[in-house]
Image: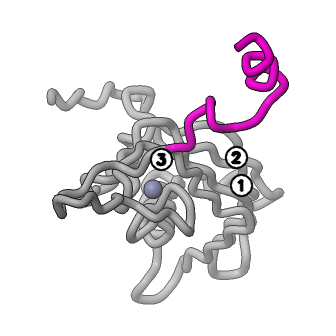
Amino acid sequence: MAVLPPKIGTKEWKFMLTVNLHHLKSHEVHLEGELPVKELDLDLRDPMIRAEQPLRYDLTVEKLPDAILLTGSLCLPLDCECVRCLEPFEHELNLAEWTCLLPLTGEEKVTVDNDCVDLTPYLREDILLEFPRHPLCKPDCRGLEKTSTGKTKPGRKPRAETVSSPWTELNKLKL
Ligand SMILES: [Zn+2]
């Protein structure tokens, strides 16, 4: 994949979730929107989980005496495959009351570039921690059914015909 060179004087070549410390001096900043998931640079090792949809964020940024406080919500839809029955399903990763403290002093202090702090790495860390370790389509998924030959096959869903409904009752009457 080609890497776009930065355009001089603008940062539009890359989506970045940044906050300007200068703006924070007088008031808190509200950030809301979507971040293309590739900007998060998630290092996904699990083939059962794909992240292709954008991250939605809704954050309030406050300046504390020697730190920046982020509070708000993060939401990332994931396309998963159930580890038991191999059925695809969507899992929404939700960090509803997310908070993150970014120190401006000390060893752990954030990198400030032109008064701006890139928040993306801090989002990435906490999002990765929330990833399901063993994605399951439902907590009690029974997974692959064993057949008499000992081989496994995907679990079957109940077929529509076996469920009693006014239509199946009507069909019986017709017969
Ligand atoms: Zn399942």
Q: Are marks 1 and 2 in contact (CB under 8 Å)?
A: yes
Where residue 30 appears, x then y in whole percent? Answer: 76, 49
Q: What secondary structure is marked by label 3?
A: strand
* Circle 1 residues within 10 Å: few <14, some 14–19, many ≥20: many
Nearer to us: label 3 or label 1: 3
Which residue is at 75% across, 52% downward? 29
Quarter of the image for the C terminus: give it: top right
Where residue 82 appears, x then y in whole percent? Answer: 40, 55
The residue that mark 2 highlights is 31
For label 3, being within 8 Å of ligand 1 is answered no
Three-letter amino acid code at the position of disc 1: Leu
Which residue is at 34% across, 49% downward? 154
First-in-chain label (2 vs 3):
2
Which labelled disc corresponds to residue 30?
A: none
The residue that mark 3 highlights is 78
Three-letter amino acid code at the position of disc 3: Leu
User: Which quadrant holds residue 79?
Assistant: top left
Judging depth in this view, the residue of 68 and 44 nearest the camera is 44
In reply to whether residue 158 is colored magenta, the answer given is yes
Q: Quadrant of ligand 1?
A: bottom left
Q: Is residue 71 shown above or below 22?
A: below
Q: Which residues are magenta?
A: 157-175
Three-letter amino acid code at the position of disc 2: Leu
Quarter of the image for the N terminus: give it: top left
User: Which quadrant holds residue 173?
Assistant: top right
Q: Is residue 172 shown above or below 137?
A: above
Where residue 134 appears, x then y in whole percent? Answer: 39, 68
